[in-house]
Image (cartoon, grey):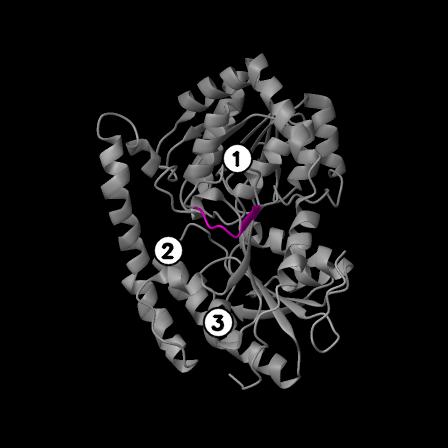
Amino acid sequence: MCDMETATGLRPKVVLAGIGTKGDLFPLLGLGQELRRRGYACDLLSNRGYEALAQSRGLGFRAVTVAQTNNLVGGRENLDGHVFPSYLPTFEYFAEQMRRGERLAVVNLDECSATNMICERFALPLCRVTLAPSAFRSVYCPPYPLNQKLQGAFANTYRLYRLPQIYARMDAAPFVLGRINPFRERLGLPPLARLSDINAPIRQRLGFFPSWFGTPQPDWPQNLRLVGFPLEASRAGLPSELEAFILREGKPLVFTPGTGVVDVERFFAEARACCERLGLPGVFLSPHYRAGGEGAGARFFHAAFVELGALLKHSALLVHHGGIGTTARALEAGIPQIIRSAAYDQPDNGDRVRALGVGAFFAPGTGDVEGLVREAGILLASTQVRERLSALSSDIRQTDALKAAADAFELALEQRGSRPRSDQL
């Protein structure tokens, strides 16, 4: 553990800033808990409703925006409904901390966070956590579906000309910059012409995935360290009813669309049909599913939530949405997975799982019962898939990503820059 101290003789308080669903926040919570063990006070700034989660890890909490219950809203709707409304409450939090003389360091999840501007204005140490490789733009290995164009006779032309044009258009981001620049003006910062320029204050980047899942590319950020999947040990065992179900029926197929998905009826209807066709038991996980027919002796079990770290090691296969945390849990458990992606990082995660040879992937809007049955049968019968999964699972279990992330964070704090300014927000 690093013995770094600030100029005042005290470690800084660490502000963990993340807007999103629970899957987005668990890595921040885990890192915060590890930093707490090292003597840092930590506050989580996030959506309303996560106070109990933060407190269970010994973290302070400040709600800076409304609760987020559906993670499939459009990008603009999410920004306007959750991210941009967090700006003023976030500024107010930092103003309070500075008036109290707190020394601050920040860990955040994305470039639209208000904390990027605050760190730039007041020269606060900033660490960026990236949960999935799809966040990085690359002309060498772009995320899915852009990578599909790097094949055939025109692949090099696409790489040299079309991809840079696509990225430049994304970087211009008039909708996002139109919201961010007024707040930069409020802080006395110059307007941005490119969204990527907001990342200039980042001292350290942490990629919360292993290099075999996302191989670093020459045009990825140079201050990036990959630490592995941030998977904490399961905090609870299986519910007794589920444990009895698995003992009676055998290893099940597990189906979950994610806690932030509310329209789940079709997903689970196809899940039930898949289990029936394969003659295997099924576990259905969602707080939004209206169970029917799972009575005594049925081969289906429904729960609103079960810790995947506890469940998947007793399961045969996982069918899910492709969120990075759920993807990592299946890899940790050493079981094949079928990803039925919808948005955000999910399609790219699915494409990477398929490329690793340990799962199947359906692009957004594709896939049906026939596809589920076919792919599940192939994966469950493959000796090669089992051997590959065993090797990847062993690598994950031997890696302490949260410890490595905390080590990197502390080393970044030792890079003493200019002293934070004392004038107020």
SS label for mark 3: helix
Q: CA distance from mark 2 to mark 1?
A: 25 Å
Residue on which the image places disc 3 = 120
Q: Is residue 392 visible?
A: yes
Q: Is residue 327 above or below residue 66?
A: above
Q: For residue 213, which numbered disc appears in the image?
A: 1
Q: Amino acid at mark 3?
A: Glu
Where residue 337 appears, x then y in whole percent?
A: 53, 28
Q: Which residues are magenta?
A: 220-225
Q: Which is nearer the eye, 22 or 372? A: 22
Residue found 68% across the figure and 29% down from its top = 394
User: Is residue 341 toward the left or the right of residue 258 in the image?
Assistant: left
Q: For residue 75, which numbered disc appears in the image?
A: 2
Q: CA distance from mark 1 to mark 3?
A: 32 Å
Q: Quadrant of residue 44?
A: bottom right
SS label for mark 1: loop
Q: Amino acid at mark 1?
A: Phe
Q: Is residue 244 above or below residue 287?
A: above
Q: CA distance from mark 3 to mark 2?
A: 25 Å
Q: Is residue 298 visible?
A: no
Mark with earlier residue (1, 3): 3
